[in-house]
Image (cartoon, coloured by chain):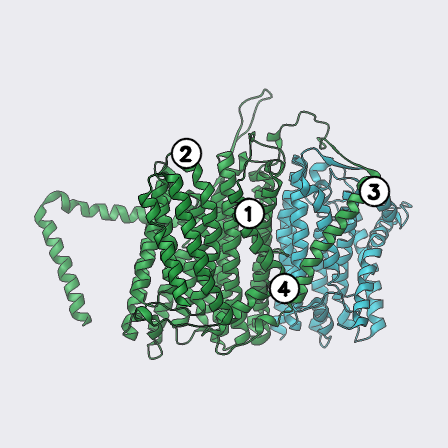
Amino acid sequence: MNILFFAGLAVQISAIIFPAVIKNPKKALVISQGFLIAGLLISIVPTLILLFLNISDFDTRFGGLFHFDGLANYFLFVMQLVAIPTTIYNLSYFRHYIEEKKPVRNFLIFYIIMLVSSQVIVIANHAILFLVSWEIMSISGYAGMMLEKEKEEVQTGSFYYLAASHALIFIMYIAFFLLHHESGSWFFTDFDLSNTDKYIVSAIFLLSFTSFGIKAGFIPFHFWLPQAHPIAPTPLSAFLSGVIIKLGIYGIMRTILFLPSVSEWMGWLVLSVSMISAIFGVWYALAQHDIKKLLAYHSVENIGIIGLGIGIGLIGSANNSNAIMILGYGGALLHTLNHAVFKSLLFTGSGVIYQNLGTRNIESMGGIIHHSRIFSLLFIIGSVAISGIPPLNGFVSEFIIFNGFFTISNELKNNYSLVMLLCVVGLAFVGGLAVACFTKINSIMLLGAERTKIESFKVSKTEYLSLWIFAGICIFIGFYPQPVLAILNNVLADRFVPEFSETLFSIKWIYINLVSLAIIAGVALLYLLRLAVKKRYGIRKSPAWGCGYSDITSRMQYSASSYADELNTIPRALLVYRKHIKQAKTVYPEKTHFESHSEDFVDRNMVMPGFRKFRSAMLKLDYFSKSDVRYYVFFILLTIAFYGMVAYLWS
Amino acid sequence: MELNELIQGFISLLFIFAFSPLFAGIVNKQKAIFVGKVGAPVLQPYYELIKLFKKETINADSSSFISVFSPLINFATVIIAAAVLPIGFWKPLISFDGDIILFAYLLGLARFFQILAAMDIGSSFEGMGASREALFAIFAEPIFFFTVGSIAFVSGHTSINDIFHSVRLDNITVIVFVVVCSISSFILAVTECSRMPIDDPNTHLELTMIHEVMILDNSGIDLFFYQLSSYIKLFIYSVILTSFFYPFSIENYWLALLIFFVVMLFISTALAVTETITSRFKMKNIPQYLLFATAIGILNLLIFTFSG
């Protein structure tokens, strides 16, 4: 079975040759992406078979470097599922860049490397292999971002990415060295911490939660994410936000498997960090005008929701409750898949808009729905899904997480109920904010009259194909979640929970199926009624009510900032939300001006000042390099002596 | 599910569907009497609905298929949400563990498309209403989970039917709890159904409206669906309010029904009285008012935690 997977992986790697060899970028694009899709299709087959049949296959070839357990297979599945439509989308998206003579061939090479290395990360059973492929994945992501390197925002954003990637991998090294030191092995399967001091176990957990948390984008480690993801080419943004940050979630889940026993504070820590991430992620998103930046902040929110699931699972593990564990981890894993799908849908959708209108600023969009109804429908499907509203997939995973909160309260009682009620209210609040945010972008971007004239709005067939695949998965999981839940049950039964249990199926999903169907059937019936009424009593179009004012232009519509203004004003200190208004003061017309922007609190008030201080401290050392070269040599000797002493004391 | 329960569920749903305009009519009649007018007949909402149904439908120029489908989605989801609620001891049509979440999120779906439809017109008036709707909904959602959610936590059930029929009156705290919950869920009902003092359903100035301004450019069959679903929504939230009083009916079938009708009548009077004696709040004060209701929710949480 795994041979088939490796064959698929080999086909994917072989796709690198084409952009490297073929000089014509168009041909290179088509052939390499074709190979990539073929490779992905070959390798998704064994992944699916392993998941459905619940085979936990520890591959002993290649000296046991790879493993195919439930968790690895699940994340492989998520990646491949998202990578296929994203790669299809590449086919048309890069046409535009090829015409502009951008180095698309280089990008393709890095894209393929990133795709392959991220799959290797998930199946790596050896710490060094894991770290090396992680590094390759990070660097190739960085290189892929540099497609439009002449732009200043690209330079800044990609530097954020690079810095964060290096910071996190440094912490990850320490975590893995500790694991190696305690267990004496580099193999994940041999990591045995049962005799380890509990402080070291806690340290390992904290280190890996920090490092993987930076990748996943939990607040306060999220600051790099909204800087880096928007500036990448759209398919890469989709892949980074949809899949790569999920590797952080994978890392956290993997670490949980290493721990001999889970303490309850870990659950509370993850739960509180996630709640903050969820609430402020979406609140920051509300204040954004740049569609891709907004979506990047939404990733922070959704990572928070996934984290809530993990937190529930950890609390369940600490209290030895099977049901809580399954609902928590299950909700987290399902939301991982769901978020990967609808976030990619929204990102690719925003890419289509960017190519047609040439802007990412939502304030200058509008009226897209009059040019392409199908495209708008697809974008709205993605928005409904991400807001966690029935009948689409976001609701299913949030529903499981809600059930997790209720189950904790029922099983553990007392003060747990109090905190869980607060969590339920918090998640509902996040849902409300997400609705506000996505009604904002949908109504400003798609609906109303055109704020700037749209000459033509073209969506190519390949773009439609990839958007439809994403939307189709959203609809399928929303209407019929049972197959995915069966997969999740298998994944969790593989070492996550002590015994196989059907808790996920104790929820009566049949009602969710029926309600979803009822919504569609109801709307269809009412539409027929409306058609009948239309025939009898007539329907026509007429100008909107202008309150007696006849000369209405499209610029007088409600804008995104006015829509979200009141909401942004409430936490304005935390959002660093500022408005600059220049009002007309005389009766005669004069130039007025309004602008509003929001900066990231963590970035502006914590990270940047910290680095500035660090820099000025480091600049003081500059004195030595200016004075005498012998000081320099002295410092080198001092450093070597320090390391030598540490090494001596250690052994 | 037994056939008997299925029939009961259908009858409750039909009951909600058929009598929600009447409820609005009763509120209006009481309001008129309270200020010394004769008022429109109690059946006036029905006449208005029939008239709307027969009128020509006009859509705004810049509107799209969202405006066509939003009233339908609104109506369908509100009806499905109504199917979750128990009336007396009759089991609702849809009742399973977790339907409290489904209920809240179904109304979220209705809201999502109503806001989109409002923005679809492309006029600032609708935009203003939509923005306010989104803002107040965010504060209303926590109130729902603090009131209905806290009783769910106390009872250990997550199905609305089981929640309200499993809490028993055995000490004074439950009575305090019921009182506190009914205050905050009354505020919730007022907010969600856009009544005074949050929103004025009778005003004619667009700048001051929330729900009414969102449907300003709708007419005919579209307005029919919007109006009917807003009547049903008012009825639904009142039914939730009555549910808090079921613990007083000790498994008595007829007493529960009696409680239902008495409390409904009481709510209609309370609505009429508040709408007559209060004026609408300033827009910027509304979030504070809603946070006050949230604070009440936290209060009943504490009651339960510390009374054991």
Which circle, 2 or 3, is nearer the viewer? Answer: 2
Can you say whether B222 is above or below A129 in the image? above
Tell me the residue that label 2 is attached to. Answer: A99
C-alpha span from label 1 to label 2: 46 Å
Can you say whether B219 is above or below B98 in the image? above
For disc 3, the chain is: B
The secondary structure type at the circle numbered 4 is helix
Which numbered disc, 1 or 2, marks the residue that appears first in the sequence? 2
Dot 3 amino acid type? Leu
Can you say whether A226 is above or below B235 in the image? above
The residue sitting at 66% across, 66% down in the picture is A510
Foreground of the two, A473 or B210? A473
Q: Where is residue A138 in the image (x, y as percent from the top left)?
A: 34, 53
For disc 4, the chain is: B
The tag on residue A14 is: none
C-alpha span from label 3 to label 1: 40 Å
The secondary structure type at the circle numbered 1 is loop
The secondary structure type at the circle numbered 2 is helix
Using a 10 Å C-alpha cutoff, classify the residue at mark 2 as few (fewer than 14 neighbours), some (14 to 19) or many (20 or more): few
Foreground of the two, B308 or B137? B137
Tell me the residue that label 3 is attached to. Answer: B52
- Residues under numbered marks 4 and 1 in contact, where contact means CB atoms less than 8 Å apart: no
Residue A294 shown left or right of residue A605 in the figure: right
Tell me the residue that label 1 is attached to. Answer: A570
Dot 4 amino acid type? Leu
Which tint was used for chain B? cyan
Residue A604 shown left or right of residue B19 in the figure: left
Dot 2 amino acid type? Glu
Which tint was used for chain A? green
